[in-house]
Image (spheres, grey):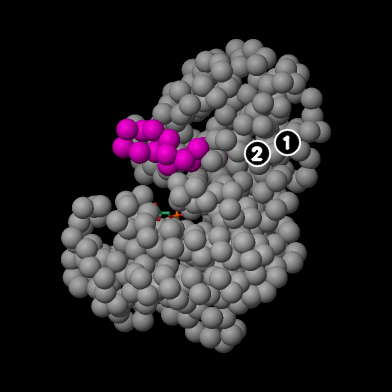
Amino acid sequence: MRTIDDINFKNKRALIRVDFNVPLNDKFEITDDTRIRAAVPTIKKILSDGGSVVLMSHLGRPKSGPEDKFSLKHLIKDLSERFDTDVKFASDCIGEEAESKSSGLQPGEILLLENLRFYPEETKGDEGFAKKLAAHGDIYVNDAFGTAHRAHASTSIVAQFFDEKVCGYVMAAEIENAQKVLDKADKPYTAIMGGAKISDKILIIEKLLDKVDNLIIGGGMSYTFFKAMGGDIGSSLVEEDKLDLANELIKKAKEKGVNLELPFDSVIADKFDNNAKTDIVRNGAIPDGWMGLDIGPQAREVFAKTIKSSKTILWNGPMGVFEMSNFAKGTTGIAEAVIEATEKGAFSLIGGGDSAAAVNLLGYGDKVSYVSTGGGALLEYMEGKELPGVKALED
Ligand SMILES: Nc1ncnc2c1ncn2[C@@H]1O[C@H](COP(=O)(O)OP(=O)(O)O)[C@@H](O)[C@H]1O
Ligand SMILES: O=C(OP(=O)(O)O)[C@H](O)COP(=O)(O)O
């Protein structure tokens, strides 16, 4: 795959697909800038060549058109400070305003486009929409590893409109690092999955069962499994149409001799609030009106033991709603076990927007082997899949 180092960007406009899907608090402040920080060297190389930069990204999962909370305008101040320049902004990613701003860019200037997902055409991979995006640049750069598993207009379809298409430094480094584990994972190999994007990530489990010795499932992901086994989960997060698949996966794990660990207990709450009333109960026995928001103390202990005896660890998805301090113990406990294993020589790979945020928030970012900007993308790569965002650069 060609990289930005193969190109001199002098007087060229680079259209860069970045993954600036960063967590924001209720004041729209960035709470973890890992994904932005990661993209800085790519942007700086292009600017120092004498080129200009058009940045495009999604933020969150807007359902129907523009929504203020998903606007990329919230990132302008951070980017302007970071690059010590007035980053320009187009309040629509396509159309006259955006085109006039991108065509008027001077060397050294940066333009940020509004959230691509304000158009359903983005996730549908619409060719007409991709062509309009392509008009913003002379060279296409994909540096959005975190979104490389999506065959969307800006991550994959757009590439066909460029003679020059290359990957940025984030993409190159992520692939190189993930490849190392894919080629040789020392055993015992343990995958830890959690988080909230159940419908996406549960599909990855089957393939991972061929690779790992232990599979730990915690966080929001676990309740679909408990419901599938006939347990009571109250109003915990669940993916109703994945119950059969969950049972199937439990069976397959047994057949393949993989040690599947689900959390024995949960910290439950009577509402989705840090100040909610809480209790600790056995999983599968959550009363109506209560929801599981973190793994419980017994689960922490059992999971930690497995993790500490592992030689390769792949973790995506927090064990609970770590953003609220009362539901962060599970994620903290697991992070500490991962660090202990790493200190004893294990290779630990942690990925995902929120997982990276959790690890950095705890100040553990430099104590694990590698923090990836991708969660779903990393898991799909580790399952052996070709990522559409990477394939589009090779075609
Ligand atoms: N039990 C739970 N109930 C609801 N949300 C949860 C639960 N456990 C974890 N989460 C949420 O999952 C989110 C992260 O999920 P996900 O996007 O899949 O991870 P990542 O971004 O690391 O790939 C976090 O915001 C966290 O609050
Ligand atoms: O946050 C992301 O993925 P992740 O939650 O797997 O880390 C990426 O920005 C992709 O977002 P998407 O899962 O809404 O396509």
The residue that label 2 is drawn on is 142
> Considering depth in this image, is 212 or 32 the residue closer to the camera?
32
Question: Gap in Å between the C-alphas at discs 2 and 1?
Answer: 8 Å
According to the picture, the residue beneath numbered tag 1 turns out to be: 165
Nearest the viewer among 163 and 354 is: 354
User: Which residue shows up at 44% across the image and 63% down it?
Assistant: 333
- The verdict on residue 257 being magenta is no
Residue 141 placed where, x, y %? 67, 34
Res 294 quadrant in image: bottom left
Disc 2 marks a residue whose amino acid type is Asn
Residue at x-position 34% and y-position 69%: 296
Observer-side mark, 2 or 1, equals 2
Mark 2 and mark 1 in contact? Answer it, CB < 8 Å. yes
Q: Position of residue 228 (x, y in %)?
A: 36, 78
Query: What range is drawn magenta here?
Result: 19-33
Residue 77 lies, with reference to residue 327, above or below; the image says above
| Residue 374 seen from this side | no
Secondary element at image label 1: strand
Q: Earlier in the sequence, mark 2 or mark 1?
A: 2
Q: Amino acid at mark 1?
A: Lys
Q: Quadrant of the N terminus?
A: top right
